[in-house]
Image (cartoon, helix red, strand yellow):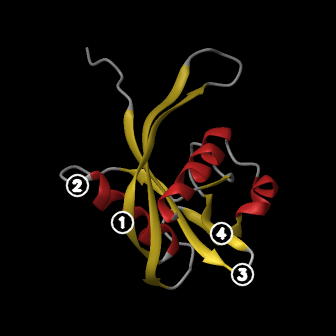
Amino acid sequence: MNEPRPLIGIGTVVLRSSAGGLDVLLVQRGRAPRVGEWSIPGGKQEWGETVRTAAAREVLEETGIEVEILGLIDVVDSLTSLPGTADLSHHYTLIDFAARPVGGVLQAGDDAVDARWVPLSQLADYHLWDETIRIIHQAERFLA
């Protein structure tokens, strides 16, 4: 019998300078887990794909933005339980990268229903997962 194993997910914090400081690229998720919630672009790594290639691909597919990967931010576990139980429904090992935009046109695609540049000062308006906020702020060091 096969034991369940975590899935590898890749997330990318894309930051750009703006008149008001820094903006981060966010997507509104169109699929489970966390459907309807806002997050950084990301998804599953494909067989034979490097993590950096996956990071850039997911940003392009979900937002239309081409990026340069700047470096690894952190690795985070996302554990989601079935409602009212302690039974896991999802376990992702999330590998998060920092990036900067280098081209493309912003447009939601793939499994994102919306994509937008959000000033860091407005992150609270998007009700992000605490770990996502932490990762976004850690990405700022790559632009220093």
Q: CA distance from mark 2 to mark 4?
A: 30 Å
Task: Tell me which amino acid carries mark 2.
Answer: Glu
Residue 133 % position (x, y): 65, 47
Residue topped by disc 3: 19
Q: Position of 11 compared to 18: left or right?
A: left
Q: CA distance from mark 3 to mark 1?
A: 28 Å
Pointer 2 or 4: first along the chain:
4
Residue 36 % position (x, y): 68, 53
Mark closer to the observer (3, 1):
3
Q: Which residue lies at the image location 44% right of the left edge and 84% below the top edge? A: 103
Residue topped by disc 2: 49
Task: Tell me which amino acid carries mark 1.
Answer: Arg
- Tag 2: Cα neighbours inside 10 Å, few (<14), some, or many (≥20)? few
- Tag 4: Cα neighbours inside 10 Å, few (<14), some, or many (≥20)? some
- Tag 1: Cα neighbours inside 10 Å, few (<14), some, or many (≥20)? many
Q: Which residue lies at the image location 65% right of the left edge and 16% below the top edge? A: 85
Pointer 3 or 1: first along the chain:
3
Quadrant for the N terminus in the image: top left
Disc 1 and disc 4 in contact, CB within 8 angstroms = no
Mark closer to the observer (1, 4):
4
Residue 127 % position (x, y): 76, 49
Disc 1 and disc 2 in contact, CB within 8 angstroms = yes
Residue topped by disc 4: 22
Instruction: Answer with the quarter of the image where residue 94 lies.
Output: top left
Q: Position of 41 compared to 17: left or right?
A: left
Q: Position of 39 compared to 12: left or right?
A: right
Q: CA distance from mark 4 to mark 3?
A: 8 Å
Label 1, secondary structure: give it. helix
Front residue of 99 and 45:
99
Disc marking residue 57: 1
Pointer 2 or 3: first along the chain:
3
